[in-house]
Image (spheres, helix red, strand yellow):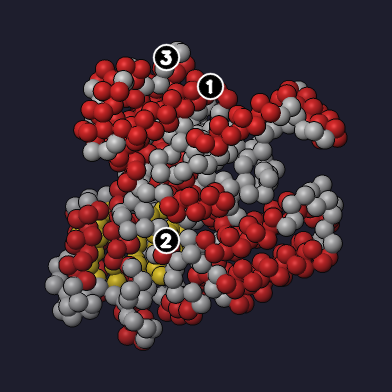
Amino acid sequence: MFNSLSDRLTATFKNLRGKGRLSEADVDGTIREIRRALLDADVALPVVRAFIGRIRERALSEEVSGALNPGQQVVKVVNDELVGILGGETRRLNYAKRPPTVIMLAGLQGAGKTTLAGKLAHWLKSEGHRPMLVAADLQRPNAVNQLEIVGERAGAFVYAPEPGNGVGDPVQVATDSLEVAKSKLHDVVIVDTAGRLGIDEELMQQASDIRSAVNPDEVLFVIDAMIGQDAVKTAEAFLEGVDFTGVVLSKLDGDSRGGAALSVAEVTGKPIMFASTGESMKEFEQFHPDRMADRILDMGDIMTLIEQAEKNFDEKETAKLQKKVESGEDFDLNDFLTQMSGLKKMGSMKKMLGMMPGMSQYKDQLENFDEREVDRVEAIVRSMTPAERTNPKILNGSRRARIAKGAGTTVTAVNQLMERFTQAQKMMRGMTRGGGMPGMGGGGGAPGMGAMPGMGAMPGGGANRKKKAAGKKKGRKGGQSGNPAKRAQQAQALEDKKAGKTKDPVGSAFGGVDLDGEEDFDMKNLPKGFGGMFPGGK
């Protein structure tokens, strides 16, 4: 999602890097490229004009011209405005003081309301609620049956008293559902309403009648993220007809442009609350404007990664691993397997790695990454005996041949895995220095990427690491520059760091931009139970 816009903006800002002063021509050129990037992303023209106007005004002000690094300051300005255009602050659901909380879904046919109803129910269950789905779409063929299947997948009760296919009164079904929810102790009711291929009076009247009958706490407008400029017209029509309270973006994973997201919140003044980012029930997330702006600008989304890890990693196993490492014991293949299982639960590895800062430069490697490689690695480890997992040093040639045969792979693949595992062990021994993912063998550069199966040679792993080592042997002591001025600068930076005057910048495509003026991200500040995911965490 937002790939097109992200790539264009990243390329634009690279031209500003290192400039001590920005001329008006530099600002105009940057703004011109931003405008083209937004239009290519299918953002509505009125939104583009307003957005560009605000950026121009701030970019030409003393805020930028007086900054020590004006290029980074322009990036900060664009980031701030992106957060604003996406809704500003994270908007959470309003729950009723006395249950049940009623959430009504509205939108055109084909926008993905029914599937999204199931995803929302699944998400609410993970938050500790007992949701109930209501089949109030009685017009579309098999809509009731589809909701029942979706509800079964989500593990939620579905109230469907009418067969649908043109039979039944949707207003009566929605009204009766409230009493059913109270009797069955469901604290959230999600009403799936009918849509149309286009906006018409009958659709709006029915949606308005249902709203009047159930008096929902939230009315969520579901919109297909791929419809581009039409998103604005559709959103304005539903705002007038139903007066929705929030927006949900469906199929956000299917569109690399994302213009709908940047247009709807600005035009309607209503916040984007959720986004559907894939086919499975788990690929549904709360929408955070600040995090999405960081993703667009290739600054990563570490907080979402942390939240996903906290949900999917076993806290007891994580604490056990942390104590083991702190006591000086070696990270073994049983620990490796535990970490791999936790990572698999987090969902797509491509999406997870894509949330790392500065990943746009590894886009080709990410695209070529085969998700099945993780399963192949797991199969190799599970083909080992308990003794072999605990003490990998006993893996001689015959044992490796047996493991390869049991996993349905080659000895070469087993050898490559053991190489990565050795890297992971070394990294875990020095985990207080930070960087990378346990069980994945990352070093410098893109965290954890170098040793990921199927990722090829990348910074921090494999061939590149050997090249770097060879380069250090040939170069000057401590990686010093041959330029005397630069060498003096390096020495000063080292002294400052030892004195605690500087901080290591967060990795980003723009050289560690500190957007909010707050303390940079530190692995030691990770939440409790996250230590198994990143070294230095607790």
Residue drawn at point x = 75 percent, y = 56 percent: 16
Q: Which residue is mark 1?
A: 430
**Residue 84 shows in this picture:** no
Instruction: Give how far across and how far down residue 318 sits, in percent.
Output: 39, 27
Residue drawn at point x = 39 percent, y = 33 percent: 416
- Element type where label 1 sits in the image: loop
What type is the residue that disc 2 sits on?
Asp
Mark before the other along the chain sequence, 1 or 3: 3
Q: Is 171 situated left or right of 237 in this image?
A: left
Residue toward you, 17 or 253: 17
Q: Which residue is mark 2?
A: 253
- Element type where label 2 sits in the image: helix
**Residue 401 shows in this picture:** yes
Tell me where residue 378 sits by quadrant: top left
* Label 2, residues with CA under 10 Å away: few <14, some 14-19, many ≥20: many
Q: Is 440 situated left or right of 340 in this image?
A: right
Q: Which residue is mark 3?
A: 329
Mark before the other along the chain sequence, 3 or 2: 2
What type is the residue that disc 1 sits on?
Gly
Mark 1–mark 2 contact, CB under 8 Å?
Answer: no
Instruction: Give how far across and how far down residue 151 sits, in percent.
Output: 22, 58
Going by the picture, which residue comes out furthest to the bottom? 201
Q: Is 150 situated left or right of 310 in this image?
A: left
For the residues carrying marks 3 and 2, which lies nearer the camera in this image?
A: 3
Residue drawn at point x = 36 percent, y = 76 percent: 108
Residue toward you, 423 or 327: 423
Spatial CA distance of label 1 from label 2 is: 37 Å
- Element type where label 3 sits in the image: loop
Residue drawn at point x = 43 percent, y = 31 percent: 420
What type is the residue that disc 3 sits on?
Glu
